[in-house]
Image (tube, rainbow, N blue to C red):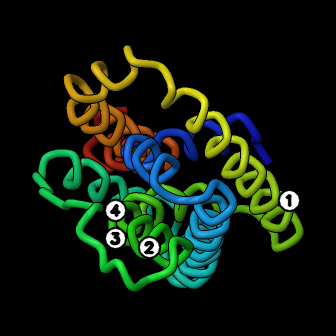
Amino acid sequence: MNYWLLFVTFIAVNLDFFFILLCLVNKYPLRDVIIGYMIGVALLVTSSFAAGKVLALFFPEWLLGFLGILPIYMALHDNDEDPNQQSATRSPILIVLITYLAVCSGCNLSIFLPILTGISLNHFGLALSFILTLTILVVILIKEIGKLSPVARFMDKYSELLMKIIYIGVGIYVFFDSGLIRHLAQWGGLV
């Protein structure tokens, strides 16, 4: 299991949510934000692992590389989601969870799926523990980063472009990592 790949993937698929987290950690108790975020991450990563295992039973790994289209599509498709349009009657944990699922479901499922497909259940438990630890650390770090005024100016100016670049990069990575590009090149007689 490649912890570096898990780390980079976690950062990449959650980068857009990190900007939303800046708002959430300033509005709600830190504990509630951590709990809501952890529940969302656990749900999506576990769903990716389970879906990957089912798909791997029926399809070769290179074919799953087509899932790389999803993050690229998301980068090119404008979503004008406003995570602050939440009901005041919901608990902060539920608000964070719903916001996370609404913003990050597609990218988490499509990107973690091919990465987690090839690992065993035991390794998945370690991977999930690692990712949940990252989740806690990220929320605490973002709380501290959010206190810096240059961060707010940078987010306003570049966050959307940066998110799109990362999604496209992750989609391309999935194409290559799954063996899809190599398989298509062999199929087309290019290799």
Residue ID for mark 4:
103
* Observer-nearest of 26 and 139: 26
Measuring from the top left, give residue 169's x and y in whole percent.
35, 34
Residue depicted at x 45% and y 54%: 27
Marks 3, 1: nearer the viewer: 3
- Compare marks 2 and 4 and give the one earlier in the sequence: 2
Residue ID for mark 2:
95
* Observer-nearest of 57 and 142: 142
- Compare marks 1 and 4 and give the one earlier in the sequence: 4
Residue ID for mark 1:
126
Measuring from the top left, give residue 135's x and y in whole percent.
66, 51
Marks 2, 1: nearer the viewer: 2
Report the amino acid beneath label 4.
Val
State yes or no: discs 1 and 4 in contact (Cβ < 8 Å). Answer: no
Alpha carbon distance from label 4 to label 3 = 4 Å
* Observer-nearest of 53 and 180: 53
Alpha carbon distance from label 3 to label 1 = 26 Å
Classify mark 2: residues with Cα within 10 Å, few (<14), some (14-19) or many (20+). Answer: many
